[in-house]
């Protein structure tokens, strides 16, 4: 069976070794040694000034929205994972969708201003598939209108833009370290901000609002990462260069096999050093996508429709029409991609895509 991704697991002995001090100290959470160690190593690896490890990428978004004190409307993208938008609603704000740019598939910066009202407090945009948003345009619009910017950088582990970490953009960037992501801790997430005041607020919020054992600075939630998860992160991090190199070679094999297949491939924004996080292909029609997907499923190959449906169709939100996102979302399929040593059916995947697209009468 070939799934859209396969979680990288470090050798069990390496993970067990990292857990030895946890067994000795019996210290399983509340910012133990391993969480602190992981945060420091991630700062070094990613080239960011700070990193708060949290329990998942969704709580990372919620903590960011809460710490920035956002109210009213938040401008966001319909083409992302559901957590981008559900966290806005969960924090009592209203998502306002702006359509995506058909080339890069990130929020269309040219349509943001017309969506701004006197209730808008922020822009929450996703660097989808690790492809950076137009950060310069977004940050210029935000500063002109006094808006905060959060980037959902769940797909961006290791992505650089114009020579520096993409995580350095926005008031806050959030990461997911879920088992399906490029770098993972089983469940987990991370928060990066260059602003010391915001960093402190998020830190206090993520630990129940505690200010020492018997005092509280205010409201908080439990967003802490455990030592068990941090150990997984430390074990995976040892292999990260290898993981990225292997995924790169899979992407290159797909690129070569699909060069004349008639499907459109990802267009990275100029200046991007990418992380090979996803391999989306865009078919000429939804019918063609479904045919290819069915054929693959028959052969035990399971690509995923990331991201379908678009988030403006969530049952708890009023529908608004977003033609570009809805069109792309119906036609995009993510092919299997992982750091697994062998991808036995990789050729079969590419052949199916090519054969079936060549049949098309486009
Ligand atoms: C995975 C993902 C999340 C949620 O992260 P979890 O760690 O699973 O909570 C949020 N946004 C995007 C774009 C994602 O892909």
Image (cartoon, helix red, strand yellow):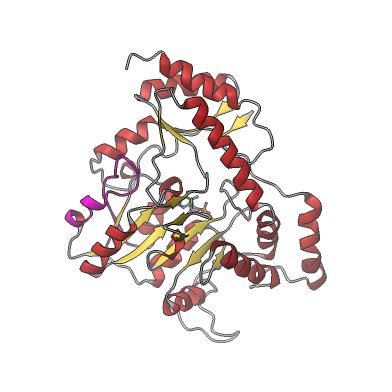
Give the percent coordinates (x, y) of residue 147. Answer: 27, 67
SS assignment for the magenta stretch, majority: loop
Residue 269: say if magenta. Answer: no
Q: Which image quadrant for residue 102?
A: top left
The boundaries of the magenta stretch are 92-114
User: Is 155 positioned to the left or the right of 246 in the image?
Assistant: left
- Where is residue 185? Give x, y as percent: 63, 56
Could you tell me which residue is drawn at 37 percent across and 21 percent down? 287
Locate residue 112, reporting x and y percent: 23, 54
Q: Which residue does the image show at 57% across and 55% down from the upper left?
A: 177
Is residue 95 one of those drawn in magenta?
yes
Task: Classify residue 94 by image quadrant.
Answer: bottom left
Q: Quadrant of the N terminus?
A: top right
**Looking at the figure, which quarter contains the C terminus?**
top left
Q: Which residue is depicted at the point 53% across and 55% down? A: 158
Is 83 above or below relative to 256? below
- Whether residue 155 appears in this view of the structure is yes
Q: Is residue 108 left or right of residue 171?
A: left
When the figure is inspected, residue 161 is found, relative to residue 131, above or below; the finding is below
Location of residue 71 by image quarter: bottom left
Q: Residue 96, how many percent across, how many down?
A: 26, 53
């Amino acid at each position: 069976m070939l799934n859209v991704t396969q979680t990288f697991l470090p050798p069990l002995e390496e993970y067990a070794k990292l857990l030895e001090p946890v067994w000795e100290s019996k210290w399983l959470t509340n910012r133990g040694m391993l969480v602190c160690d992981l945060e420091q190593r991630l700062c070094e690896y990613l080239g960011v000034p700070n990193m708060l490890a949290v329990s998942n990428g969704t709580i990372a978004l919620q903590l960011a929205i809460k710490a920035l004190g956002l109210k009213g409307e938040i401008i966001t993208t319909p083409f992302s994972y559901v957590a981008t938008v559900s966290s806005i609603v969960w924090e009592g704000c209203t998502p306002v969708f702006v359509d995506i740019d058909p080339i890069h598939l990130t929020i269309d910066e040219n349509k943001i201003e017309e969506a701004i009202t006197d209730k808008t407090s922020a822009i929450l945009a996703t660097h989808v598939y690790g492809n950076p948003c137009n950060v310069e345009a977004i940050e210029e619009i935000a500063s002109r209108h006094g808006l905060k910017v959060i980037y959902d950088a769940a797909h961006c582990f290791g992505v650089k833009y114009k020579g520096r970490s993409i995580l350095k953009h926005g008031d806050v960037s959030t990461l997911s370290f879920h088992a399906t992501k490029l770098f993972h801790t089983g469940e987990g997430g991370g928060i990066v901000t260059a602003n010391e005041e915001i960093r402190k607020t998020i830190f206090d919020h993520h630990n129940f609002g505690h200010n020492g054992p018997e005092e509280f600075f205010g409201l908080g939630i439990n967003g802490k990462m455990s030592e068990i998860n941090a150990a997984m992160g430390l074990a995976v991090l040892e292999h990260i260069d290898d993981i990225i190199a292997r995924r790169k070679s899979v992407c290159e094999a797909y690129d070569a096999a699909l060069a004349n297949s008639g499907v459109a491939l990802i267009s990275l924004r100029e200046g991007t050093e990418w992380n090979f996080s996803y391999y989306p292909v865009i078919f000429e029609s939804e019918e063609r996508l479904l045919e290819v997907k069915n054929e693959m499923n028959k052969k035990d190959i399971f690509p995923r429709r990331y991201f379908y449906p678009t988030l403006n169709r969530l049952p708890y939100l009023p529908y608004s029409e977003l033609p570009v996102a809805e069109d792309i979302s119906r036609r995009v399929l993510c092919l299997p991609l992982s750091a697994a040593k062998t991808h036995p059916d990789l050729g079969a995947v590419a052949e199916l895509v090519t054969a079936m697209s060549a049949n098309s009468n486009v």
